[in-house]
Amino acid sequence: MDIKRELEQGLEKSIRDSRDYEVYVSLVELVNRLCAGKEQPSKGKKLYYISAEFLMGKMLSNNLLNLGIYDEVKKALEENGKSLEDIAEAEAEPSLGNGGLGRLAACFVDSMATLGLNADGVGLLYHFGLFRQVFKDNSQTELPDRWGDNHKILIPTKREYTVSLGGKDLKAKMYDIFVTGYKNGSRRLHLFDLEGVDEGVVKQGIAFDKKKTDKNLTLFLYPDDSDEDGKLLRISQQYFLVSAGAQMILEDCEEKGGKPEELHKHAVVQINDTHPAMVIPELIRLLIKKGVGMDDAIRTVSLTCAYTNHTILAEALEKWDYGLLKKAVPQLMPIIDELDKRIKKKYRDKSVHIKDENNRVHMANMAIHYGFSINGVAHLHTEILKNAELNHFYKIYPEKFNNKTNGITFRRWLLCANPQLSEYIEKLIGAGFKSDFAQLSKLMKYADDEEVLANIINIKKNNKKKLAGYLEKNCDITVPLDSVFDIQIKRLHEYKRQHLNALYLINKYMEIKSGRYPKTPITAIFGAKAAAGYVMAKDIIHLLLCLSQLAREDGKVSKYLNIVMVENYNVTKAELLIPACDISEQISLASKEASGTGNMKFMANGAVTLGTMDGANVEIHSLVGDENIYIFGAKSKEVMARYKAGSYDPKDYYDKNEKLKACVDFISGEALSKLGDSKKLARLRNELLTKDYFMALPDFEDYVEVKDKALDDYEDRMLWAKKMLMNIAKSGYFSSDRTVEEYNSDIWHLG
């Protein structure tokens, strides 16, 4: 292929005379043409992976890599005075997700395409995403994330479906995004948008009239549901997704000549968390409309739908008020009533009923009863589901439960995000790892090769330099390149315990002020958004920003400690942060993180994990061994026993540990109160002393000790480099290709 000729046909002028954005548009058009010619035939049973989030990240470079033309395009651009890196900057990041749930879904559709599976993603086309995070007065503020203004990856289709909400008919229009497989064709991500959606209803920040569902339905991901209007909007949004998706699925089935009552022979629907669980009663309702009897409709849908559980947090297992459901989706209620009646007739145990005594409909319960598979996303998580949180269901359906440990696509998180490391690995072990990441284990033979270890250290330095340049240019923050880059990037939630990290940094600040200096400077970097209505999470961000300012403005401290909070953390910024990381903070309270995938991305890029025995940390630990990971804190059984006893009192730990007491008191002390909002800081301190739901205080002492041990070990650069290499070599297990292959062999059976 003559890349120059292809691009200039679209540009209608030379590459050299074109603006970067024009070249970007021409490249996207080229990608779409190539993808359209490489679509895999839709034969046999088809998977529909339905999810509220698909956090795709910028797609151009990844698509060029998967299509096998990255190097050709780069060369053609350079020969004509252009930089692919600069042109990729013109791309807006699709704001279609927020955290690990959405990034996992993105990795999965990549792997489905790479493996040649008959599978597509199904989601919503959010105009403003969650929000764009802006820091002002050391606090988070929220603005619309207008990613679609200059986006060219969306392909309009002729498909549209009528969705009834609150008695009003709305139109769902379908747009597609091509998802490229690595040297193996392409699939599609189907996104539904509301016809007539009005971006103008958003007046200030992200506030808008939640009642105007016919105008606002696809504006934001997870609109605030702290009031009744917000809850109705969430229900409506979820139903809009599943109703349009269900109509599309049945249409596909009929186009292939399938009978409605035999849907399960033609389709599999993977429900990614509880948000799309209403697809079960909606499919049943639509089948009945097509003349299928209730019994047959329930049977075929139960053989079609599978459910992935991503959490054991009670608040995340959605429960909707029956009255609100009836108001938003009255047509669905006879089906939900029937499903509940059948379960209540069969089981006396109220904990497995769909509708509880408080008239709430439990979406997870419905998905478990009327799906054929329930999977957790890491070994520990699945065992907790089976033996504790969902044990009442496991006793009924032991054959339905299975584990599918999450994975990541190394094509984005190693090949694209860290090309220098990827190229060096290829030089050492060949290119086979790019399609079979288990081959990374071949690196183990270099564990004692000092030349290889020195080169890995140098690659890390280059990535740190790149990140430092970004921080200086975009955040006006200078960080020392010879410091330890200690990074915690993930959704801001108490269970992820960014505040435990903050307590450590307060302790380190006080040590420096007293003349106890770390051997190597520390750069602690955070990236996280807090849900707009989540007060505690926003207070933690406020604390981190105040700490950042405090350390930065103190000349004595800033030589040894820098604290950075990256604004508007997203996939693009993760691609800068992860390759530069030395210590990967994975410090959630044991038993609370279902899996995590950031831990896998850091591992693949040579960071060493500091974490609890939680989620996929357990599997990382078993792969790399005690000497290549830093584990601290209470184990899951101890934590669950504390919750069960109900006897935990954070004051017990505060009163007995002077160091901890000083750190907690510092939060609302004079130094930070001068820089921030004293009410917010006092509120945060009070929450820790009176509630501390996710038990940061009991783990504090062990965390400080183990983290300091990691920092001491970092001083031996060759020892640390060996840890880096061992983590890279053992990371191949966490490929999403492996995860998706397991889903297919155990659940989907797509052939």
Image (spheres, grey):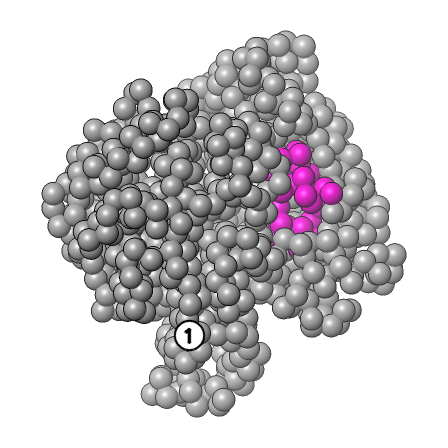
Residue visible at 53% across and 41% down? Answer: 399
Left or right, residue 463 beside residue 543? right
Residue visible at 66% across and 65% down? Answer: 436
Above-or-below relation of 714 to 449 = above
SS for dot 1: loop
Q: In the image, is residue 710 part of the stretch drawn in magenta?
A: no
Left or right, residue 700 beside residue 713? left
Residue visible at 49% across and 78% down? Answer: 82
Front-most of 732 and 141?
A: 732
Q: Is residue 713 visible?
A: yes
In the rendering, at what x and y percent does residue 252 appear?
A: 30, 65
Residue carrying label 1: 41
What is the span of residues highlighted in magenta in the rendered image?
Answer: 597-622
Above-or-below relation of 634 to 401 = above
Front-most of 89 and 359?
A: 359
Q: Quadrant of residue 706?
A: top right
Residue visible at 42% across and 67% down? Answer: 44
